[in-house]
Image (spheres, rainbow, N blue to C red):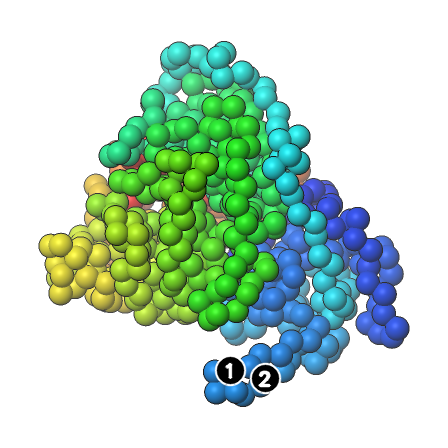
Amino acid sequence: MSLGISYHTTGRAFGVGLAMLLGSVAAPAFAEEPTLSEEAFERSKQLYFEQCAGCHGVLRKGATGKNLEPHWKKTAADGTVTEGGTLKLGQERLEKIIAWGTEGGMNNFSDIMTEEEIRDMATYIMMDPPKPPEMSLEQMKATRKVYVEPEDYPTEPLHGRNWENFFVVIERDVGKVAIIDGDTKEVLTHIPTGYAVHVIKASEHHSISEPEHPGRFWYTMGRDGKMTKIDLWQTPDKMLVSEVKIAYDARDVAVSGDGKYVIGGGYWPPHFAIVDAATMEPLKVVSTRGVNVDGDYVEESRVAAIYTTPHEPTWLVAVKELGQIWQVDYSDLDNLRIDKIDSAKFLHDGFFDPTGRYFQIAANASNKMVVVDTKERKLEAMIDVAALPHPGPGANWNDPNCGPVAGTTHLGVGTVTVWGNDPEGHPDQAWKVCYETETDGPGLFVRTHPNSKYVWADQTKHPEPEVQQSVQVIDKETGEIVKTIQITEDEGSAAVHFEFNADGTEVWVSKWNLSDSKEPNGQIVIFDAETLEEIGRIDGLYAPTGKFNVYNRSNHVT
């Protein structure tokens, strides 16, 4: 029961990942109601994995979403005991919540699940959750597949195209990634990558060390825990060069600054795995179970996001339920140094400031943006923002009053919050809210470019189709909305995610269709970044969501 529309997938054909592993776990026996037939239990288990586990957790203890255990008890600091659970809510009320959503941020599922599925899901979440298995390093190694050996990689691009202006586009519902030529607007290929790719990261320019040809290799992470390696110098039919599975359910991936290692973070099992970037051979796995910032042990403490620090030989691993950022030093894998930085729950996604020293990440349920000083490896600040911040890849720009600033959209309210992020040049404004811009609805992504006068924000979380299908453009000078653009009027479609081309003259927006179609059903709509007028559409895409320009992403352009 994901809080954001971009996290849904309606594909019923995917019997992969965590849900398949749970197939070996028998439905729990009950002396009395609630009960489900074996068939209904299996169907609900798969559907819960697809639609609900991301926010509520495999073990249903909650994170961004509410706790969905049959019965829970919580003791406050003052000794007050609160009890609740899905059994207390009951079948009828649960069905209504699933069907119609809540004001707290959960959208309705009446257009995603059938009445029978909603009824069975209400019963399923009143039953004890089955616990999935672990995954060892040896199990990971057994999943590795190599399609092109590293020694056979080309020494120059084989296609004669401007690969640094390629766009790597997630096609979630068909488990693919499209490669689009940003100059010609041609869809070059659709690469099979596994179930519901969530994140794609490239090798990047770094100050401490730099891989050869940053941006050439891209690594995906799917909901099924499959990590794939893509080589943009290959001909389109050979761009998928290798893959490995590092979890049953996962979200993020990152490449070390020297280009030697790739790290993947698991939702289940809650761990991260480090693999050899050249061969995709798994090298090390580290559990992220531990004690959270409240002093409670958490078994399902998931890796929400991973980022590579530009100036240090480290990754930042956001351990969602712990409320901790782990700064993992990859310079010595045998003696892995991990600095655990307490912050706030529940950590989700973030981005660096323009200097690359400070990392700004959303703590959804705490309504805060957390700031980490990666040089000192410590917490720098926590900024109070609106309900459920969700910046996506984020945005940095210059404000005439506050100097360098950053901003976020929110899942819970139609607001873009902007704060100062220049402690050296503007210490009085640093890590303080500069202003807020009210938008028509809650959104998932905010984006800009140094060459643009505007900041773009989507409103994908609003329940009204017209708002959900529109984006809003904010003037950097005034902080005011200068234009609302409706991307589509097609039923079941939403406008989501932004990316600029390499020189910042174009803005690409996804028209994302929720229907379970085996045919291309989405588009990328391209706008002139100066005039804000539509200049073209790219067809032939399957539910495109995230789009990543090679030059911008490998050069930290936000």
x, y percentage for residue 376? 26, 52
Residue 74 higher or lower than 170, as above or below? below
Return the residue at label 2. Answer: 82
Q: Nearer the viewer, residue 7 or 78?
A: 78
Return the residue at label 1. Answer: 76
- Check disc 2 and give the amino acid type: Thr
Do residues under tags 2 and 1 come within 8 Å of each other at their CB atoms? yes
Q: What element carries label 2?
A: strand
Q: Residue at the location (59% across, 84% down)?
A: 82
Q: Residue at the location (64% across, 69% down)?
A: 68
Screen quadrant of the N terminus = bottom right
Residue 423 higher or lower than 147, as above or below? below
- Asked which quadrant contains residue 340, the reply is bottom left
Q: In this view, does 459 lie to the left or right of 84?
A: left
Residue 38 higher or lower than 85, as above or below? above
Q: Residue at the location (58% across, 39% down)?
A: 246
- Check disc 1 and give the amino acid type: Ala
x, y percentage for residue 396? 25, 50
Q: Is residue 335 left or right of residue 476?
A: right
Q: Nearer the viewer, residue 462 or 170?
A: 170
x, y percentage for residue 522? 53, 41
Screen quadrant of the C terminus = top left
Q: Is residue 444 in view from this perspective?
A: no
x, y percentage for residue 182? 37, 29
